[in-house]
Image (cartoon, grey):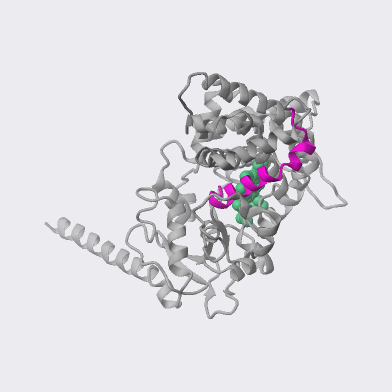
Amino acid sequence: MKLFTLFVLIILILIVITYCYVKKKYSFFETHGVPYLKPQFPFGSLQKVGSSIHMFEFLITSYNQFKRVGKIAGFYNVFEPIYLITDIEVMKAITVKDFNKFVNRGIFVNEENEPLTGHLFAIEGDRWKFIRKRLRPAFTSQRLISMYSKISRLGCKLVESIEKSTKSEKVSIDIKNVATRFTIDIISSVAFGMDSETLNDKNEELLDMFKEVIGANRPNVVKFLILSAFPNLAKILKIRLFSDKLSDFFAKEVGGNIKVRERISENPNDFLSFLIKLKNTASSSRKTRKLTLDECLAQAFLFFFAGSDTSSTTISFALTELAFNQDVQDKVRFEILEKTKGTKGEISYEALHEMTYLSQVVNETLRKYPPGFSILRTANEDYKVPDSKIIIKKGSQVVIPTIGFHYDEKYWKNPMKFDPERFTVEETAKRQPQCYFPFGEGPRNCALERDLALLMSNTELQNSSKILKLHQMQI
Ligand code: HEM
């Protein structure tokens, strides 16, 4: 009986401690005078995210709810208070003017236990500055020009693959699947000199790894919430972001490739060779050290997954919109045919540059469906929000909902409509430029030059749209 009483007492004490802890946590925004979304135990403001709604919808709804109230609002990720920015000037201040106070994203990194998490997107402070600087030469337009012929050749394979599957009259295509395979093949080829051939249904293992990273294989929402809300606890408990299978696969495939290249001194002009150079050279004049093998693997990992998913998402949405908007599709096709007259359909790098309407289509796709639909930053120190009484507390995370700005009627007439005409030179000049930022903003924006990423999507999209008679297909 005594034991039972003790047990009940312990449970009661635990309940009271949890209650006090949660109550204190959930009073953060109230105490600091920030308008906020009411939290509910245990997931805070994200109860429905991942079950009945997507984060995308959550951010648009919250942005719309709070933009009239002020420049900044709050919500709770489990117990952690997160600031939500609803004003363009504050967005600019955080990402550009006061960037030094918001260098980090504050996402999960645990290099000790999981070296692959030490990639450019996640690492912090001086280490981020150092690696970003060292990687910069890998992301220039000169590099794309040298990759162009490989991308173009893979475009022809895409054409063949779609032609094969569209032989019957009424065919249904899982376009995200096709686009994913296509972009995996491109990144494998231009970055790692590998023929992955996922488009030809080979290398399903690679595709599986890719799906794990982007969360397409039964995403574990609870694990994700723990990692993002309690990173320190996750480190102590040695919770890993990725499976051992994925880490082993990457170390074996890419690590193995690095070893082979080092042994035979092979030096093709791709991202992997560039990384090998960083691994083996330091410059005392520029005070740079060599990169470790783990650092190289983590950057290769990011390059692979960040590059493939963003581009394939863009292609899929662009093609879906083209299928639903026959007039836009006709105009794109006309432009491609016009610019390739006399080249038997061959599209040169220069001709691609001249396809301005195609660029408008990609820009509008990235407005309506930005693959990176929010920007994350964490405050290094207490930060007073310009023209407001609110202080963002040191160590707190800030979310800038790109998607909210991209659908705001203040900047975009009829934002639900897919309308590439918004991106003519004249229309663009009429708008506040900062309301569109699919590649992020400030020194921590997408590492790939903006034009380069756009061009990559264009190259891929142009190859896809060339042959697709989208109105005949059910996408
Ligand atoms: C349609 C294509 C793409 C889009 C829309 C896109 C978008 C973004 C966004 C929104 C961010 C976060 C920026 C911020 O926080 O301000 C980002 C970061 C990044 N992106 Fe991209 N991206 C694309 C393609 C690529 C490709 C092809 C690569 C490389 C192969 C790449 C590499 C990176 C890297 C390394 C970062 C982290 C930068 C850092 O923290 O310093 N992206 N991207």
Taking the spot 41% from the left edge, 43% from the top edge, the residue there is 220
Taking the spot 82% from the left edge, 52% from the top edge, the residue there is 287
The image position of residue 227, as x and y in percent, is 46, 51
- Residue 370's place in the image compared with 342, above or below, is below
- Picture quarter containing residue 296? top right
Residue at the outermost right position: 285
Taking the spot 58% from the left edge, 57% from the top edge, the residue there is 105
Residue 195 located left or right of residue 180: right
The image position of residue 110, as x and y in percent, is 55, 48
- Residue 174's place in the image compared with 264, above or below, is below
Screen quadrant of the N terminus: bottom left
**What residue span does the magenta drawing correspond to?**
346-371
| 84 in magenta | no
Taking the spot 54% from the left edge, 51% from the top edge, the residue there is 368
Give the dominant element type of the magenta stretch: helix, strand or loop. Answer: helix
Residue 230 visible in the snapshot? no
Residue at the outermost left position: 1
The image position of residue 286, as x and y in percent, is 85, 52
The image position of residue 59, as x and y in percent, is 46, 58
- Residue 285's place in the image compared with 176, above or below, is below
- Residue 215's place in the image compared with 366, above or below, is above
- Of the pair 164 and 170, the residue shown nearer to us: 170
| 347 in magenta | yes
- Of the pair 70 and 249, the residue shown nearer to us: 70
- Picture quarter containing residue 336? top right
